[in-house]
């Protein structure tokens, strides 16, 4: 017999920074209702995730964000808790910039490398992993479901109460919840149709059925948010080749606009591994990514769960192009290196984003958080943390 659909007080879609921070923020404020956290990826982190390998236990690659910055004079409350439990540590690696003539300069203002710099302790995914640990330590039911695609959002009114049933691609019920929070834009944005071939936008369909003007306004704003994509080349260098990369005078290299135009790369990070090897992550320029929007890494969650698998030759062409650009720029070889491709379809949201006045739609029992909310920290991890804390404050009196 089929198992009964689980019920929860709150369902959170997305275990990136904002989704995990929301769970921790609610618990730290004393709320102990049941939470279902659903995430398409294999673990928490979102763009602050870390790539691991079952066959290579020493491998860890911070493939979305090698660090994060805090610019506000009053940082998010959760930052202190994370630092106290050694989930994060200051980023002290040298940061340099490079122009099209290969001239090294000091760090430039790119919005991500000023203020106070932090990194996950040991790996970037510790940021989200420890937020979830913090939430679970304080009591209440919190079930984490990774590798789970939410495809449909089904609101249902019974008398005066509203509930949300979240369904998978086949229409099977994943969870039924009194409140729903979306911590990303995928289920509200037309790119779900463009990239994955869906015949509807899940939140748009739900908003239409509810006829809630507040939700319709929030959905329209979310659907209008443009974002820059990023194709990331992940390289693992053997110990004998790693020494030259580890000897570079930077751990993070920013490409100036002229360098981006020449090589098609935006940022490069060198990440030492414990066994003497190193990982290198070369992030593409927005222009390069825009030319390859339909190419996903074969190991990505999109490829595994959304059937967005590229042809092998297409993925190889992108890998070759990025590898050639990386060797041209650094003048260092990649002999013996293992390569992977990771593409973020909406890596960097473009302002203005979602107005915070639409953060909660009480009549529809739904809320929104993430770095796509306008205001301080927009487009950055700081914004993801701050938006989750602000949402938690609003939800406390409603959950």
Image: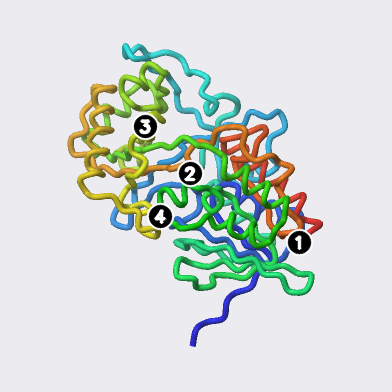
Instruction: Choose mark 2 or mark 4, whichever is in front.
Output: 4
Q: Which residue is mark 2?
A: 47
Q: Residues within 10 Å of mark 3 (few under 14, many from 20)?
A: many
Distance of label 4 from label 1 (alpha carbons): 35 Å
User: Image quadrant of residue 54?
Assistant: bottom left
Would you place residue 90 above or below residue 54 in this image? Answer: above
Q: Secondary structure at mark 3?
A: strand
Residue situated furthest left in the rendering: 335
Q: CA distance from mark 3 to mark 2?
A: 15 Å
Taking depth in this image into account, of 188 and 26 the one nearest to the observer is: 188
User: Is residue 56 visible to us here?
Assistant: yes
Is residue 327 toward the left or the right of residue 162 in the image?
left
The location of residue 125, given as percent across then percent down, is 49, 47
Q: CA distance from mark 2 to mark 1?
A: 28 Å
Q: Which residue is mark 3?
A: 284
At 53% across and 20% down in the image, what residue appears? 109
Instruction: Give percent across and percent down for residue 31.
Output: 75, 60
Left or right? Give the position of 150 relative to 358: left
Choose the circle earlier in sequence order: 4 or 1: 4
Mark closer to the observer (4, 1): 4
Image marks 2 and 1: residues in contact by CB distance under 8 Å = no
Give the structural element (helix, strand or loop) at label 2. helix
Percent of width and height locating residue 310: 28, 50
What residue is disc 1 on? 399
- Disc 1 vs disc 3: Cβ atoms closer than 8 Å? no
Taking 312 as reference, is 63 left or right? right
Between 160 and 330, the residue placed more toward the observer is 160
**225 lies left or right of 79:** left
**Residue 197: image tag:** 4
Coloring applied to the structure? rainbow
Q: In the structure shown, which secondary structural element does the residue marked by tag 4 occupy? A: loop
């Amino acid at each position: 017999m089929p198992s009964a659909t689980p019920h929860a007080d709150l369902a959170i879609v997305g275990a990136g920074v904002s989704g995990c921070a929301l769970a921790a923020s609610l618990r730290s404020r004393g709320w102990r209702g049941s939470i279902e956290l659903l995430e398409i990826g294999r673990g928490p982190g979102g763009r602050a995730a870390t790539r691991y390998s079952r066959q290579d236990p020493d491998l860890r690659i911070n493939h979305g964000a090698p660090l994060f910055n805090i610019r506000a004079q009053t940082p998010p409350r959760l930052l202190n808790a994370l630092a106290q439990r050694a989930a994060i540590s200051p980023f002290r690696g040298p940061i340099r910039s490079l122009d099209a003539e290969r001239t090294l300069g000091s760090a430039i203002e790119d919005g991500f490398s000023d203020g106070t710099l932090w990194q996950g302790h040991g790996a970037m995914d510790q940021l989200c992993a420890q937020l979830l640990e913090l939430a679970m330590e304080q009591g209440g039911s919190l079930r984490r479901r990774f590798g789970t695609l939410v495809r449909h959002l089904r609101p249902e009114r019974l008398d005066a109460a509203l509930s949300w049933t979240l369904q998978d691609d086949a229409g099977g019920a994943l969870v039924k919840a009194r409140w729903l929070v979306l911590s990303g834009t995928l289920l509200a944005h037309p790119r779900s149709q463009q990239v994955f071939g869906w015949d509807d936008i899940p939140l748009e369909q739900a908003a239409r059925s509810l006829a809630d003007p507040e939700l319709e306004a929030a959905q329209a704003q979310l659907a209008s948010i443009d974002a820059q994509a990023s194709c990331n080349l992940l390289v693992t260098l053997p110990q004998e080749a790693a020494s030259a990369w580890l000897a570079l005078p930077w751990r993070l290299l920013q490409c100036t606009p002229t360098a981006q135009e020449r090589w098609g790369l935006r940022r490069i990070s060198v990440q030492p591994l414990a066994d003497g090897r190193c990982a290198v992550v070369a992030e593409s320029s927005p222009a390069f990514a825009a030319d390859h929007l339909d190419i996903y890494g074969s190991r990505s969650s999109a490829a595994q769960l959304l059937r967005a698998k590229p042809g092998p030759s297409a993925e190889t062409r992108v890998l070759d192009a990025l590898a050639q650009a990386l060797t041209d720029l650094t003048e260092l070889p990649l002999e013996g290196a293992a390569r992977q491709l990771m593409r973020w379809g909406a890596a960097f949201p473009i302002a203005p984003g979602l107005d915070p006045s639409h953060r909660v739609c009480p009549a529809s029992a739904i809320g929104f958080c993430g770095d796509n909310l306008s205001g301080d920290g927009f487009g950055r991890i700081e914004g993801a943390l701050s938006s989750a804390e602000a949402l938690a404050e609003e939800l406390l009196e409603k959950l």
